[in-house]
Amino acid sequence: MKIDWASLALVAVTTVVAAISIVGIFALGVAALTHAPAQGARPNAPARLAGYACMGVAGLIAVYGIYLIIPAFH
């Protein structure tokens, strides 16, 4: 049995980069939603919009990854 180390490394690097990207985008969304301008105040509209957009993008990336993994969806 021969292992294609270059392909294995490519998959490993792609996995790490994708995981860091999804977690980073989701963390930006949480930070945008929880950072209030004053004590007890709600975040302003652009921050809320950015937070929800980041969380939506992270969710879409996760759903796309599931789509790629499950062959019945193709």
Image (cartoon, rainbow, N blue to C red):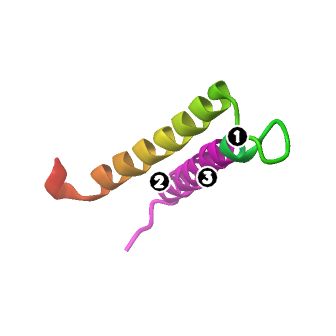
In primary-sequence order, the first of circles 3 and 2 is 2
Q: Place residue 16 in its image quadrant.
A: bottom right
- Residue furthest to the top: 46
Relative horizontal placement of residue 51, taking residue 73 as reference (left or right): right
Q: Is residue 44 above or below residue 14?
A: above
In primary-sequence order, the first of circles 1 and 3 is 3
Tag 3: amino acid: Val
Could you tell me which residue is drawn at 64 percent across and 25 percent down? 46
Residue under label 1, please give it: 42
Q: Secondary structure at mark 3?
A: helix
Residue under label 3, please give it: 23
Kindly report the secondary structure that dominates the magenta region of the rendered protein. Answer: helix
Tag 1: amino acid: Arg
Give the alpha-carbon distance from disc 3 to disc 2, as whole Å. Answer: 24 Å
What percent of the width, then of the height, locates residue 58?
50, 45
Within-10-Å neighbours for mark 2: few <14, some 14–19, many 20+: few
Viewer-proximal residue among 41 and 6: 41
Report the label total: 3
Cβ atoms at labels 2 and 1 below 8 Å apart = no
Q: Secondary structure at mark 2?
A: helix
Viewer-proximal residue among 70 and 48: 48
Relative horizontal placement of residue 38, taking residue 62 as reference (left or right): right
Residue under label 2, please give it: 7
| Part of the protein shown in magenta | 1-30
